[in-house]
Amino acid sequence: MEKLSQIIIKLKWIIVTSVLALTIFFGYQTQFLTINSDILSSLPDDDPAASLYKEIGTQFGGNDMGMIVLESDNVFKTEILQHIKQITDSLRYTDGVSTVTSLTNILDIKSSEWGIEIGKLVDEYNLPNKQSQLDSLKNYVFSKEMYKGAIVSEDGTATVVMFTLLPDADKQAVAKMIKSKVENLNLPETLYFGGLPMMMNDISDLILSDIVWLLPIVFVIIALILLLSFKSFRGVLLPLLTAGIAVIWTIGIMVVTGYELTIISNIIPVVLLALGSAYTIHVLNSINQSKEKDRKQALIKALTYIIIPVILAAVTTAIGFVSFVFGAYLTMIKDFGIFTAVGTLIALLLSIFFVPALISAFSMYRKKIETDQPEKENILTHKILQPLVTLLFKHPKYSLTAWGILLLLSIGGMFFIKTSVNMADYFKKDNPTRVSEDVMQKKFGGSLPVFVVFEGDMQSPEVLKMMIKTEHFMKEDPNIDMTQSVADLVEQMNDAMGEGKMIPDDKAKIEQLWFLLDGQDVMTQLVSEDLDKGIIQSRFASVETKNIDEFTSKMNKFIQENKSENIKLELTGMPSVYVKLNNSLIQSQYSSLIIAIIMVLLIVGLMLRSISKGVYATIPIIATILILFGFMGITGIPLDIATVLVGSIALGIGIDYSIHIITGFNFHLKETGDAEKAIEKTILSSGNAVIINVLSVAAGFLVLIFSQIVPLQNFGILVAISMFGSGIGALTLLPVILILTNRKRKIVANNHKQ
């Protein structure tokens, strides 16, 4: 390490200019960064539910369903029908829109004196303008199951315009265009925009606003903490400079390798600003504590001591992030793991190469070190760490008991943890998108699309009757209000012919009715061109995990019981995807944590050449993770796509503090030969850096409280808590374990001597 330190100082100008050149290159790349808020694009291709959901989009004209609700005191008015037609026409002529369905263009099947009449519910070129016509329309709409509660709310105060997007459309761009077009109509009614495309567009806007205004806040807060801690320009500049460069390089690498910013990876800059400064803080703390009169030698000695613990800290943090690659279901979480690990290692390299090179190149040394002069009283050392050392040595068992009680309470709280995968929960309760989703749920049975896919002869009475049977079964669930399939249309046509609302037993009769349906826009949404596949479309009202689980479980059981040689059924849609997501949250939480714990144990054990010390180092952080999950259970913070990251991140970052205490203990034990003196010296020297580090990292993450995205707010709170927990654990629980184990060794050694 000493040789490496000497090489770094010798090659200082090459290092500084190389870093500058790379920063300019990657900084230029950041302007090409794009945002992708589409959670569906992050679903794995090898997952059956996800691949079937994507397949439906291709085969049946899009699965991305958007909804625009127009609310008034009564929708059965001529001017409101005109406004609905305006919205319908605006959407119809928007690039990327596949289908549009509204009160003014929806298909209607009824009997007439000539037999069956297939047309539109209203004549869009001659809208009803007399009260008698409007009343007649209202009565007719409420008499039909396919309209009531599906296209017009049951109280008649709202109507919905539904649209689907083409599979290859730029969903965010189309959603933005739709919203802009409709808002520019300046309609007097209240409008609500909902469904996945609209939510994704809104999330994209929130991601952008978060980055623009959260990053400067993180910078300022960390700068203030560094100024109060180091009381020097160098102490503020260098940690923030390395963190800033790490962010620029990481985002630049993302762009160069073709990755986009997602709802998860948008927190990478905040994570790296908080973390990237941590390694430089330890390096500066080590340099500040060096007593060498020769400034160059002081730098080399400090660097020689700190390189191993900083490498250990960064590698274990990176492992915490990399564990997501093996345990996560969503590709966006895997990408987050990869790039935060890359950013962490960049911050490490900058702290041990760039920072010392910069200090040496620009003579950014401390003021002249007066070794004869007594050191000024350090508030952290004398007011916090010294009393802490006294307490730990006097009452180690009290500290252990306090931790024990806290852990028991936390384990109890863990049983109350809930999961949440609903995208509407990403928005604050007063956010227009969240309000819109609540209206959709209350008045139109939600916006979560549900599909049951049938494979078989779509003109077969057996297949169509099974479709009707499936629809009846689906409607038994309180969260399914409406269903639509080609079987419904055949039933209605048969009814209009005066033969009852049922599927004819004769295939030839079905083919005759089918002939009348050919060419209708709705058919491409319900059956394939070859008539070998068809779907039931529906919407699920509840966003509760329990309700979604129950529905998918019942449907899958029904499907298994009703499959035959001639009919194959499969369930997909957002509830099925949410179930997969939900299960994956728990699975990825376990797997990523187990992978991270094992890897951290092995690496720390190998680098410290002692598995027992590796175990000691992980005890405080495992205790912190238990407290973290207990806190989530007690406070009701759910496990979602953001908070599922916290456990492994807490492990990866929090282990750093224990590593610095363990390596400090090893160093001072060799120096003094006395375990108790080594523990005291370690707490008084490394404790400063640990406290500064905890405060700066926790403050950086707490800035996420101001995020517009709810899971990210919870994420910030939980990581901050884990930083305080792991920092306190490293300064109390770990020293207590070392004190008690070394006291036992002393007693055993004394007994042998006697």
Image: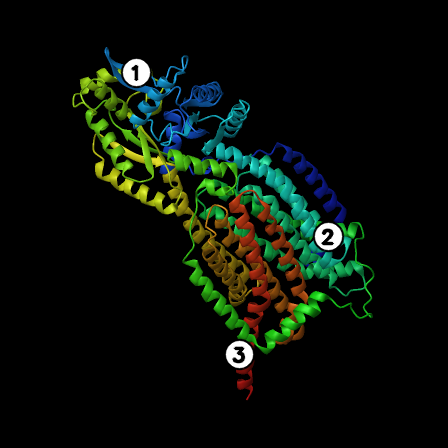
Graded by Cα atoms within 10 Å as few (under 14), some (14 to 19) or many (20 or more), the crowding at tag 1 reads some
Which residue is at a point 81% across and 62% down the rendered structure image?
294
Counting labels gives: 3
- Outermost residue, front side: 131
Q: Which mark is residue 744?
A: 3
Residue carrying label 2: 236
Kind of residue at disc 2: Val
N-terminal of the two: label 2 or label 3? 2
Query: Does residue 551 show up?
Result: yes
Marks 3/1: CA distance?
90 Å
660 vs 573, nearest the viewer? 573
| Helix, strand or loop under label 3 | helix
**As shown in the figure, which amino acid type bears the numbered disc 1?**
Ile
Question: How far across and down, in percent of the image, does residue 269 sit?
Answer: 61, 44
Which-is-in-front pick, marks 1 and 2? 1
Could you say whether the residue bearing mark 2 is in a helix, strand or loop? helix
The image shows residue 571 at horizontal and vertical percentages of: 32, 36
On-image quarter of the C terminus: bottom right
The residue under label 1 is: 118
- Residue occupying the point 44% across, 36% down: 439
306 vs 137: above or below: below
Q: Nearer the viewer, residue 404 or 93?
A: 93
Considering depth in this image, is 454 or 686 the residue closer to the camera?
454
